[in-house]
Image (spheres, rainbow, N blue to C red):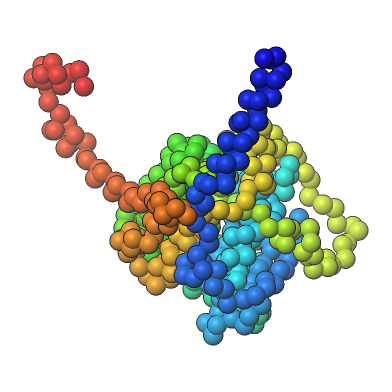
Amino acid sequence: MPARTRLRLALTLTLGLAGAYGAVAATPPTQPKEGPGGSAYGAATVVKRALGRSGAVTLAFYGNTPPAAQGRPVAVFLHAWGATNPQVYGAWIEHLARSGYLVLFPRFQEVNRTRPADASSVAAGLLKDALADLASDEAAKPDLSRVALIGHLAGVPLAANLAAHAAETGLPTPKLIFGVMPGGIARDDRARGVALHDLGRIAPTTLIVTVIGDRDARAADLAARRIMREASAVPVERKLLLRALSDDHGFPALSATLASPAGGNPAYDAGAIKPPPEPPKDPKQKPPPFKWTPDMALTGEQTTLVAQINNAGTDSLDYLAYWKTFDMAAAAAFAGQDGATLKANPRFSDMERWSDGWPVRRLGVETPRPPAPAKSPDAKASDAKPPETRSPAARVR
């Protein structure tokens, strides 16, 4: 048999088997019809508004139904570095807005013009201005006693910094910090990335939940644990570490990548949401000088990750690992409950079942270890054995 014929037969067999597998493979669970993460929405459509001015915009989203008497809970969505268009998170934003939230999306970064070291102060200023604009708005009606911060990648250290500086910046103290795939943390303000500020100032009443995946997990895990450790005023029982697990039991497979919390919806394209007209500029007033620095540009790795974020769709991980867990964590935080309440709820970690009845891999739920008590120098000296009295085995360790 000629080589070309053998190759054609092999390709035909391979494609046929792939098609047969796709036709019979189990499918992943869809969005729940009701409950946390579910589609039983009170609002049919979403109001989309731009607040601020060109280059300093916060986008606001809320359902078309009247707010409750106490107002709408506020979800502040802090995007990944380079993912400045809310369109890439549009599926999650729509879920939140139609569920009753006022969603604020501060565009704290102008690509190639904003330094990561400045992002925390920029985000704080944008949020403060947006909340001032909406304070007397009866349609938006933010309830500042129920505020949650959602961060993705570099948005997670930003959320932590905003919570730490809430009192001094005049922002409401968040009840919940919900960080998915935390990353982009710099060693200090001179290094590339977002430097963590004094997280010991985060209010002890805050609930902190981080979610990582099992793909490219090490850096996100280290970042999550560092944030938990440095938020020293928050008790351990108010902290939870979640891990979403990939699952290829059926088709399409579920892959818990760094980009997986994103999910595009073109209805949330920032270009289609017009900001209010700007006041006339004084021709004598010169713009502040601009100095470009290399950390304003995206690295090659960041560019690749942003492309993955832009192309992300929605699947069971969105509905059950991110949306559902946020909904449940926010409800617990607003009610003053701690992480133990969530951890004890079997629904919190449940990922439901493939269409053939096989369970999707559950979320890992962990409470971080409490910090070890510091020993005084005298205690350390007294605990240590003299070198000559140690056994050979002790010296090997």
Q: Is residue 179 visible?
A: no
Q: Position of residue 152 (x, y in %)?
A: 55, 50
Q: Position of residue 355 (x, y in %)?
A: 47, 55
- Seen at 62% across and 82% down, the residue is 66
The quadrant of the picture occupied by the C terminus is top left
**Count of labels shown?**
0
The correct choice, above or below, for 64 with respect to 212 in the image is: below
The correct choice, above or below, for 33 with respect to 87 in the image is: below
The quadrant of the picture occupied by the N terminus is top right
Judged from this view, the residue extending furthest toward the front is 1
Going by the image, does 167 lie left or right of 87? Answer: left
- Seen at 70% across and 37% down, the residue is 297
Nearer the observer, 155 or 6: 6
Nearer the observer, 209 or 322: 322
- Seen at 69% across and 63% down, the residue is 59
Judged from this view, the residue extending furthest toward the bottom is 69
Going by the image, does 181 lie left or right of 300? Answer: left
Judged from this view, the residue extending furthest toward the left is 389
The correct choice, above or below, for 43 with respect to 186 in the image is: below
Nearer the observer, 353 or 199: 353
Q: Position of residue 315 (x, y in %)?
A: 56, 53
Q: Is residue 332 visible?
A: yes
- Seen at 47% across and 61% down, the residue is 324
The correct choice, above or below, for 22 with respect to 392 in the image is: below
Going by the image, does 303 lie left or right of 158? Answer: right
Q: Position of residue 347 (x, y in %)?
A: 37, 62
Going by the image, does 348 lie left or right of 323? Answer: left
